[in-house]
Image (spheres, rainbow, N blue to C red):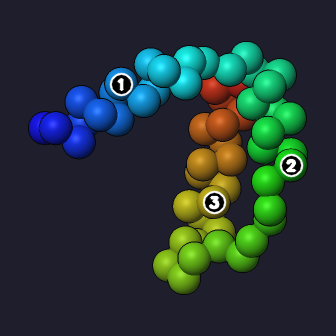
Amino acid sequence: MRKQKKFTELLEKLGKVSQEEAEVILKKREQVDPDDGLTQDIITHFQQRIQEYKS
């Protein structure tokens, strides 16, 4: 419970970023190979969910 409170406080302190800021941050991140067990089906599912969220 204490860790959750600290995490929540940190999120509040950091604030939110705009969609444009998030896109810039994500484009700058290091691209790595997926973990073992992360199938192409799972990756595709999450990519679809991200696109739905953006729409």
Question: According to the image, label 3 marks what residue?
Answer: 43
Question: According to the image, label 1 marks what residue?
Answer: 9
Which quadrant holds residue 35? bottom right
Q: Where is residue 3 in the image (x, y as percent from the top left)?
A: 23, 42
The residue shown at (55%, 24%) is 14
Q: Is residue 55 visible?
A: no
SS at mark 2 in the image: helix
Which residue occupies the foreground of this view, 27 or 44?
A: 27
14 relative to 9 in the view: left or right: right
The residue shown at (56%, 18%) is 15
Question: According to the image, label 2 marks what residue?
Answer: 28
Residue 26: assigned label = none
6 relative to 49 in the view: left or right: left
| Image quarter of the C terminus | top right
Relative to residue 45, is residue 39 depicted above or below?
A: below
Check disc 1: other Cα within 10 Å, few if <14, some if 14-19, many if 20+: few
Query: Which residue sits furthest bottom?
Result: 36
42 relative to 7 in the view: left or right: right
| Three-letter code for the amino acid on which mark 2 is drawn | Lys
The residue shown at (79%, 54%) is 29
| Three-letter code for the amino acid on which mark 3 is drawn | Ile
SS at mark 3 in the image: helix
Q: Position of residue 1 (x, y in %)?
A: 13, 38
Mark in front: 1 vs 3: 1
